[in-house]
Amino acid sequence: MLKTIEGVVVSTTPFSENSKIINILTKDGIISVMSKGSKKVNSPLRIISNKLTYGEYTIYYNKDKLSTLKEGSVINEFKHIHSELSLISYFTYITELSSQVMKENTFEEIYNLYIKTILKIENGFNPIVMMNILEIKLLDYLGVTLSLNGCAKCGSDKDIITIDPDAGGYLCKNCYTNEVIYDEKVRKMLRMYYLVDIDSIKELKITDYVIDAINHFMTVYYDRYTGIYTHSKKFLNEKY
C-alpha cells in the first residue's frame, strides 16, 4: 500500500549498480526503503535519497520487509548546517544517537525531540547546547535519568554542592567525599536543559565555561551509563 512518511535518511547501502537502500528515521522508527535508480545523475530520487536529507517520502510500504520509494520531496535543505563541517558533525552525531535510542523505543516523542533539536541548530543556535539538551532528555528513554531534584544518595534538597556522574545526580554536603565540584551555575543550567521545552527556546545566553562543563559532564555520564557508543561523538570530542 502507498504510505507517506516524514523523516531523515540516517544511512544508505548500495544495491546493484544504480540503486540503494535508504534507512529513514521516522516517528514510527527506522524504515528501510529501496530507492531504485537513485544513483543515476538524472534520477528524480537522487537528492531525496542522500544521507542526512530531511524529507517527505511516498513509499510502497511493506511491513517487516523492504519498502520501495515512489517519490519524495525535501522539507528542509539545512543549508546552514551543510555550510560548516562542524555543524555536519553535530548533525551526524545527533542523528546516530537518536537512531540508537529509537531502536529500543519507537516513541514519536523521541523523533519530535530530534527534529526540534536539528531545526534549532539550523536556525543558528549553539550546537553543543542543543546537543546536550537532547542528550539529557533522551536519558528518560534509556532508563538512566539524572537525579536533579535532590541528592542522588540521600534525597535531601538541602546544601547541594555538586553533581556527580557516578552518583547519577546532585550531591549534598553530607554525602560529598572528594567528587569534582560543579558550581551552582552549572547545576542550575543542567537542570534547565532537562526541563526546557525546545520549541520555547528563543535565545541562549550561556557562558562558555558553563557550556563546556555541562558538555564534559554529559560525555562522562553517557560513557558510563548508557552503553551507547558512536564514532561521530568520538570525532566531536577530538576535533571540537
Image (cartoon, rainbow, N blue to C red):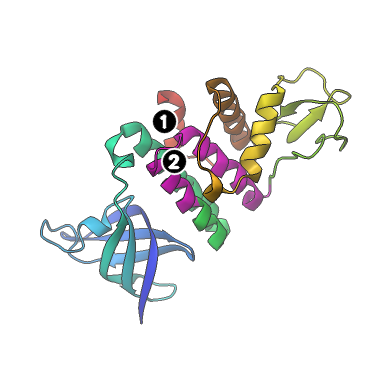
Q: Amino acid at mark 1?
A: Phe
* Residue 138 forms part of the magenta stretch: yes
Q: Residue furthest left?
A: 42
- Tell me where residue 180 appears, x and y as whole percent: 71, 19
Q: Residue furthest front?
A: 202
- Tell me where residue 181 appears, x and y as whole percent: 72, 19
Q: With respect to residue 44, does 139 lie above or below?
A: above
Which residue does the image show at 36% across and 82% down from the upper left?
A: 1
Q: Main secondary structure of the magenta part?
A: helix
- Tell me where residue 58 appears, x and y as whole percent: 31, 72
Q: Is residue 1 left or right of residue 234?
A: left
| Distance from Cα at disc 2 to Cα at disc 1 | 9 Å
Q: Earlier in the sequence, mark 2 or mark 1?
A: 2
* Residue 183 forms part of the magenta stretch: no
Q: Residue furthest bottom?
A: 1
Residue span colored magenta:
114-143
Do the numbered discs 2 and 1 sit on residues whose CB atoms are within 8 Å?
yes
Q: Amino acid at mark 2?
A: Tyr
Q: Quadrant of residue 224?
A: top right
Residue assigned mark 1: 235
Instruction: Look at the numbered disc 1 and give the secondary structure of its residue.
Output: helix
Residue assigned mark 2: 93
